[in-house]
Image (cartoon, rainbow, N blue to C red):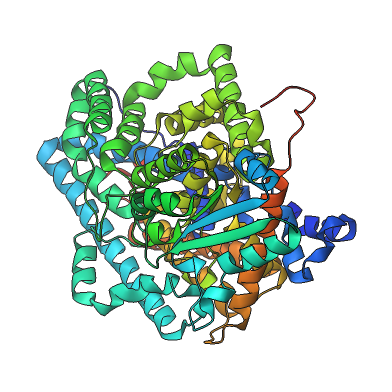
Amino acid sequence: MPPISTERDLRLDLFRGLALWLIFLDHIPSNAVSWITIRNYGFSDATEIFVFISGYTAAFVYGRGMRDHGLIVAGARILKRVWQIYVAHVFLFAIYLAEISYIAQSFDNPLYSEEMGILDFLKQPDVTILQALLLKFKPVNMDVLPLYIVLLLGFAPALWLLLRSPSIALGASALLYALMWQFEWNIPAYPGGHWIFNPFAWQLLFVFGAWCALGGAQRLARWLNSPVVVGLAVAYLLFCFGIVMTWHVPRLGVFVPKLVSDLIYPIDKTNLDVLRIAHFLSLAVITVWLVPRDWPALKSRIFWPTIVCGQHSLKIFCLGVFLSFAAHFVFTEISNRVPVQIIVSLTGIAVMVAAAAVVSWYKRIERGGPGPRPPAHKPSYAGGGA
Amino acid sequence: MRLLRLLLPAVLLAAGPALAEHPAECRVAENQIENDFPLPRVTAALANKRLDILVMGAGSSALPGADGANKAYPARLQSVLAEKLPGVTIKVTADVKSGRTAPDAFKAISASLAASKPALTIWQAGTVDAMRAVELDVFSAALDKGVETAHAAGSDVILINAQYSPRTESIIALGIYADNMRWVALQREIPLFDRFSIMKLWAELGTFDFMAITKKLDTAERVHDCIARLLADLIVEGAKPVAPPPDGKR
């Protein structure tokens, strides 16, 4: 069995915190500040970072538990986590219902007679709410937690295999990804269609994160530092940047040869397009190359606000979804001028940091150690919430 | 990017001589009309002094009320183009149905093309597809095949994306559908009329108030009029015979 590193890698918390901020900014519709987020400059977005790091930390947190106490105990802990995430999702749905009910009461404009049809589902709350509890009806921006629930539900057997034979486990995950593309597997959604984030596709990134946590990262280290790999990553990121610019500036579109556009479009987010994976991996290669694990700045105060958010990801994610609703409310009811958008975005991030600090403080007073894991674990290997 | 877009209209207002014919409220979004793809079938139709246009659309291509059909952008487009292109007979046929998805419109497109024999098809999509969460690959495939069908029937195509609707923005996920429309347009090398960005710019500049809670039609009519004017500019520009660029691209 591979050794499980006991020292906390602060880079994980840092980049997960960053991903949570970016997800918050991207979730606010028509937000001027969201032009800084990575999805405007390449194919992948913060979701990839979030899923990968969540897989990494899940292996970190539950891996040792499984090795010391076996499949049953670790599996039970994972299920407990699944339940917490489900409850969080239902809580967010309640907030969403409050928001949409408010809009339904106040919205009337002949320009938008078509758009107002979206409120029709309120006419049959019996069906809608039940479908939401079954995770089939998922409003805009509420797709990540259901994905996370499904990924964790399948995680106990995946982890069991990862601990015994990491290569076979990763191969099985890639095979599932390939089969998903071949047979178009996905989970049905309500009122129609399928899940926006196909778990059969996104599991690859989650399992890859777990694989990296369980010794894979060390095995890759030799490759990651090679100038060829870094060069390829930079070249690919530049290519993606060029393509994405043609979306922002359509006039540039004529410079993309038809052969290339036939090859790349559409870039499938639902099924985690290979181009998106490659973009995420390129970003990861550059990041690992630029930010070494023992970089002293990771312990400085500058990065503390991001790291503390990354250490309490579930709570801060949910808060972020709530705050993005609230921000949209401010834009529609008060003002959506650009300065207001900037202030609202910064305020939202400040609230996320403050909340994360309070959660940390609660953890400390409850058991006198950092990290959000229950006391059954040794504090030394707490890697942040999975 | 966005700041650039905010600053550009001011520059263009000072600079654009050809733009002066439209009301100022339409003109501020003029720089959003970016297109380098030609409309050769429209060029040919204009040479023959007759331009037939088919609008395939859903609810946001229409306005309610008794006079709605005359005030919505398809009818306005006909009037504006007639003014811009004296001597050319312009006929705009609107095949508009509320609640129609892109796959539904694709099913209807062959019959509509056969009935009106247009040199240009303007296809508005995206809103209903996002509301009903039509599968993205089905959505893209419908647009792509629709463009192919129209081209085969001798018609150029312009795609129009969803309206900007601030109040429903957090409950209708338009973004990914807009992206897929952009990709179909780039792949097929046809113009995309970016109605979403145009309306958003108007909202940012305070040109129109899209937040208003009202039953009155005046703003809606002005918006449709501006959409028609900007669309007419795009058509006329796209139909200009193109000289090949010096570096031989395209």
Q: Nearer the viewer, residue A147 or B143?
A: B143
Is B77 displayed left or right of A267 in the figure?
Answer: right
Which residue is pictured at 74% across the width and 54% down the height?
A: B31
**x and y percentages locating residue A72 in the rendered image:** 10, 41
State the count of labels. Answer: 0
Is A163 displayed left or right of A259 in the figure?
Answer: left
Q: Which residue lies furthest to the left in this view?
A: A72
**x and y percentages locating residue A28 in the rendered image:** 52, 62
Q: Which of A334 and A383 is in front in this view?
A: A334
Q: Nearer the viewer, residue A362 or A219?
A: A219
Quadrant in the picture for residue A299: top right
Is A206 displayed left or right of B235 in the figure?
Answer: left
Which residue is pictured at 63% across the width and 38% down the height?
A: B40
Looking at the image, residue B103 lies above or below residue A215: below
Which residue is pictured at 37% across the width and 66% down the height?
A: B99
Which residue is pictured at 59% across the width and 17% down the height?
A: A231
Question: The N terminus of chain A appears in which quarter of the rendering?
Answer: top left
Q: Quick check: can you spot residue B240?
A: yes
Is B27 displayed left or right of A227 in the figure?
Answer: right
**x and y percentages locating residue A129 in the rendered image:** 23, 70
Q: Quick check: can you spot residue A308?
A: no
**x and y percentages locating residue A164 in the rendered image:** 19, 22
Q: Nearer the viewer, residue A323 or B153?
A: B153
